[in-house]
Amino acid sequence: SRRHLCRSLRGRHQLVAASPPDMPPIPKGELLQAYLERHRDSDYGFQHEFELLPDRFTDRTTRASEAQENLYKNRYPDIKCYDQTRVRLAQMDGICGSDYINANFVLGYKERKKFICAQGPMENTVCDYWRMIWEQHLELILMLTNLEEYSKTKCAKYWPDKRETKNFGDITVEHVKERAYSDYVVRELKMTRLGERDPRTIVQYHFLVWKDFVAPEHPHAILRFIKRVNEAYSLEKGPILVHCSAGVGRTGTLVALDSLLQQLADEGQVSIFNTVCDLRHMRNFLVQSLKQYIFIYRALMEMAQYGDTEISASQLKSTVTKLRQRDNGKEKCRMEEEYD
């Protein structure tokens, strides 16, 4: 099973609190009923299940995050990174803690290290961010926060303005181009490093409509976003860097959905609770709020019910023509039936 696969990847762990239940996967055809059952009585079922998720593991330590020389590199004091899965930067001579950045490797559905989940960079860690991108050979960045939300800074702007160039330590970043869509922006960045000949291309997908601690109003936008990212992803491109502000709430929700959507497609079932448990063993507090946990269920339920409803521009005319047709003996056309 997926649960045992993940446990074999990470090794068995013992929780500080009582071990959470090993919940059976939910078949595709039962997702709607599972959602409705948990939604009863003011989301009591969701609340109960969310509270069973572990947030501490005895086989995980956070010494690097707690080291005196690294405290100022953490955006939030309670969001620490596990030593066992943290991304280690190349040590700089004579600089204690120069290998530290608040980021962890996180598994995907089948890949051990599909993602790097990180906090949003601060002004004093932007250069470290670009060092990580260079050293880990990253090509895809998913940004799930705005620079400012609720009149508070959530992330430092770590890329230059359009068609401009900016230096971050010994790394130079050029903003080549960008394209805006309804819910997100795609930016192409080119980076070079002092002493290195060949430039590298980085593509940043910046999702614009997801506020901290909450969930998007409707799943379709984030489902389409995940689809676009996976169309661009390949193992050869290295891990996908995902960040919001703390790197746990929105970041964890997207990473969980990516894994579960693939499980739904491959197996016809989903292990939502177990998957979030496994992800939290890689980086603490992934999927931070109850609303985000419920959103995962809702997005998967809608995908199971309706599938991928996106229509490309080239197929729109033929699709509308088909929907206007009436099947033999029926009063309504397919479009009217779909609307009903």
Image (spheres, grey):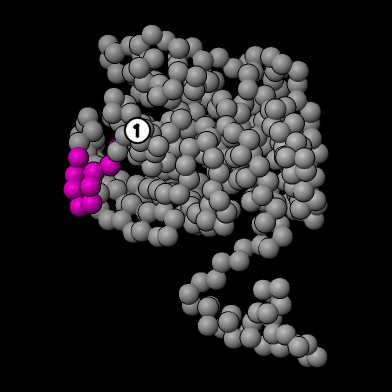
- Is 89 contained in the magenta span? no
- Frontmost residue, 105 versus 29: 29
Element class at badge 1: strand
Left or right, 201 with respect to 221, comes to left
State the image coordinates of residue 195 (x, y, percent, origin top left): 20, 34
State the image coordinates of residue 134 (x, y, percent, origin top left): 34, 36
The residue under the point 64% across, 39% down is 293
Q: Which residue is mark 1?
A: 153
State the image coordinates of residue 186 (x, y, percent, origin top left): 37, 54
Task: Magenta stretch: give its range.
Answer: 158-166
For the C terminus, give its image quadrant.
Answer: bottom right
Asked if residue 4 is positioned above or below residue 302 in the image, the reply reads: above
Overall secondary structure of the magenta stretch? loop
Question: Can you tell which quarter of the image residue 326 is in?
Answer: bottom right
The residue under the point 59% across, 17% down is 60
Asked if residue 55 is positioned above or below residue 181 in the image, the reply reads: above
